[in-house]
Image: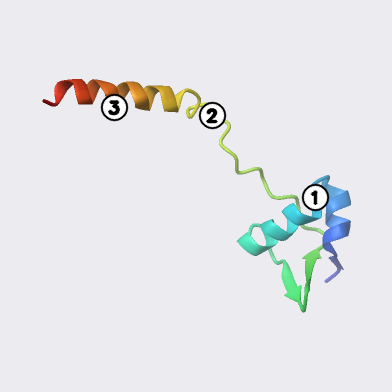
Amino acid sequence: MDYMLISEASKKWGITTRRIQTLCIEGRIKDAEKAGSIWLIPKNTEKPADARIKSGKYIGYCERYKNKKKLNSDIDP
């Protein structure tokens, strides 16, 4: 199996080497192996999907939470 280093994956995927290290540590890059102090990533591995929340459900959450808390405190004696 052919492997690439983190620096090669960084150029291929367009993300930083530190981010790739983090993805390897989290186990999000399939079949990545650590050999000593370097990570070996199979050359045919695809870039992991972005796991950030993109639905927008969290937008305004803080204000809704504050209003809900305020309403509950008004009810309690």
Indicate the quadrant where residue 62 lies: top left
Residue lying at 88% horizontally and 50% vertically, measured from the top left: 11
Position in image of residue 44 (x %, y %): 81, 58
Residue 55 disc label? 2
* CA distance separating discs 3 and 1: 41 Å
Lateral position of residue 46 relative to residue 72, left or right: right
Nearer to us of marks 2 and 1 is 1
Residue lying at 60% horizontally and 40% vertically, measured from the top left: 52
Residue that badge 3 annotates: 69
Closer to the camera in the image, 1 or 15 = 15
In this picture, is 16 found above or below 30?
above
- Residue reaching furthest to the bottom: 36
Position in image of residue 77 (x %, y %): 11, 25
In this picture, is 66 found above or below 53?
above
Kindly state the secondary structure of the residue where label 2 is placed: loop
Mark 3 crowdedness (10 Å alpha carbons): few <14, some 14-19, many ≥20: few
Report the quarter where the N terminus lies: bottom right
* CA distance separating discs 2 and 1: 25 Å
The amino acid marked with disc number 1 is Thr
Q: Are marks 3 and 2 in contact (CB under 8 Å)?
A: no
Position in image of residue 4 (x %, y %): 86, 64
